[in-house]
Image (spheres, rainbow, N blue to C red):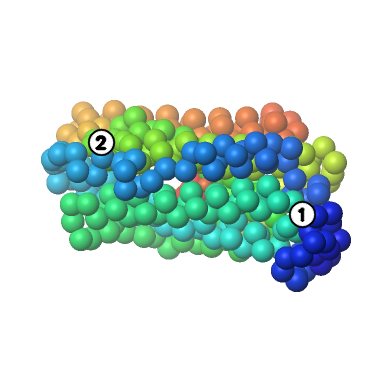
Amino acid sequence: MGLGAGGAAGVGGPDGRFDLDDRDLVWADLAPHLYAQAAARQWDPQTAVPWDDPFVLPADVEAAVVQVMTYLVENEQAALLVPARFVGRIHPHFREVVQLLAVQMADEARHMEVFSRRALLRGAELGTSSAGGRQSLYTLVAESDFALASFLLSVLGEGCFVDLLSFLHQFAPDPVTRRICWLAGQDERRHVVFGMAHLEHQAQVDPALRDRLRAAIHRRHDALLDTAGLNEDVFDALVVLAAGGWHPDQVSAGFDRVQALRHAMDQGRQRRLVRLGFRPDEAVALSALHTRNFM
Ligand SMILES: [Fe+2]
Ligand SMILES: [Fe+2]
């Protein structure tokens, strides 16, 4: 469909062809409300974060923060690319959906900025990136079906990130890390709400959707079968942050807290899968196939 086929779009605007031109493929009744909320809650990275608050961390704790920030930046890049791939394919008649995705991209741009700035606040070196993590993100960005990409990104990936950011907010060793994880977590909640609202709408009008969602989880799991999943350096860094240091008694408490985080992520995925109409036992099985990279 070109512009002109849908209501007010007939008055002008760019010529173009938009293959996502069916209301049921893109819409959620919550979109106008979520857009207004997103626009009202844009924060300024310069003023919303206490960059100059004094703090000194032990070297290994600082290194753990840098490693986690490096991982977050890499994941934020993918989270920006996914909506970017679709925003030009959605018919502008669905104005609030286009606007909401545009603001979501601006959210991810800010997340990239604040996590990068925190990583480089005390040193010049970033942490490590892993082949398994990159492969996981590649399979996410490569998904060209809007419903499946929303499902993998927002329902599963960003859903896990809400838990991860709240974990990091809880165990952050410094005020900057604590604040940026809280700010990004608020935005990510909104991204999850839209993904869920849109897919709940689509599941109601298209009973075959669940088969496609199930197949997408299996396809991605198979594609990542030979990869390690979460970067081990990231796992260790999460343990250190949750532990507060490297002493053996601390590390064991930190390990338990990271296991509790994984459990919370799993429970959250299952809850959202059930809301999309999967049986509870199938939600357990599908959640277990989600990428170990979290996103
Ligand atoms: Fe983000
Ligand atoms: Fe996001």
Q: Which element carries disc 2, helix, strand or loop?
A: helix
Give percent across and percent down for residue 154: 59, 45
Does residue 163 appear to the left or right of 245 in the view shown? Answer: right
Does residue 12 appear to the left or right of 124 in the view shown? Answer: right
Q: Which element carries disc 1, helix, strand or loop?
A: loop
Other-residue count near label 1 (Cα within 10 Å), few / some / many at <14 / 14–19 / ≥20: some
Near-viewer residue (212 or 2): 2
Residue at the far front in the pictured view: 11
Q: Amino acid at mark 1?
A: His
Give percent across and percent down for residue 232: 35, 51
Residue at 84% over, 44% down:
206
Label 2 close to label 1 by CB (< 8 Å): no
| Mark 2 Cβ and ligand 1 under 8 Å apart | no
Near-viewer residue (111 or 70): 111
Choose mark 2 or mark 1, whichever is in front. Answer: 1
- Specify the quadrant of the image occupied by residue 179: top left
- Where does label 1 land, which residue? 93
Give percent across and percent down for residue 111: 41, 49
Give percent across and percent down for residue 74: 42, 57
Q: Earlier in the sequence, mark 2 or mark 1?
A: 1
- Where does label 2 land, which residue? 175
Q: Amino acid at mark 2?
A: Pro
Other-residue count near label 2 (Cα within 10 Å), few / some / many at <14 / 14–19 / ≥20: some
